Image (tube, rainbow, N blue to C red):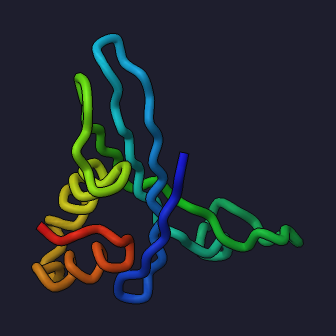
Amino acid sequence: MNQYEFMLNGINYLISNESKRTRNGFKHESTIYKKISKKSLSFITADDSPNQYEFVELEKAKVFYINRTWERFQFESVMKKLITNHFKYLLSVDEFTYKAIYNQLGIESL
């Protein structure tokens, strides 16, 4: 498993990636999380916990492979799919925003 963090409009995001075997090959799964303060969660009471932040799952993506992958680096395709699926409904996200996210993650733009 590996993880990448990036920031967009002052909000911290985390992408977690996993590779799993399937019957006919393998798959890459990617999940995006939003980092929020525990104090902003009404159902969590303030305590003396050293971890003051919580990651909330926003969306998942999967890409299946039968044999090989030709990605520049591992999880590139599934992370692009996840980012596109999650942010496509936000009106403020345009081509330049995608490029900024990809640059923070070290992914080449489409």
Q: Is residue 21 above or below residue 51?
A: above
**Residue at point 56% right, 61% down?**
55
**Residue at point 38% right, 40% down?**
29
- In the rendered image, the quadrant that contains the N terminus is top right
- Please give left or right for residue 3 compared with residue 22 in the image: right
Q: Which quarter of the figure has residue 108? A: bottom left
Q: Is residue 48 above or below residue 63?
A: below
**Residue at point 28% right, 57% down?**
72
- Give the x, y percent position of residue 48: 88, 72
- Give the x, y percent position of residue 43: 64, 60
- Give the x, y percent position of residue 3: 52, 58
Q: Nearer the viewer, residue 104 or 14?
A: 104
**Residue at point 20% right, 56% down?**
85
- Give the x, y percent position of residue 95: 11, 79
Q: Which quarter of the figure has residue 82? A: bottom left
Q: Nearer the viewer, residue 67 or 80?
A: 67
- Please give left or right for residue 69 compared with residue 27 in the image: left
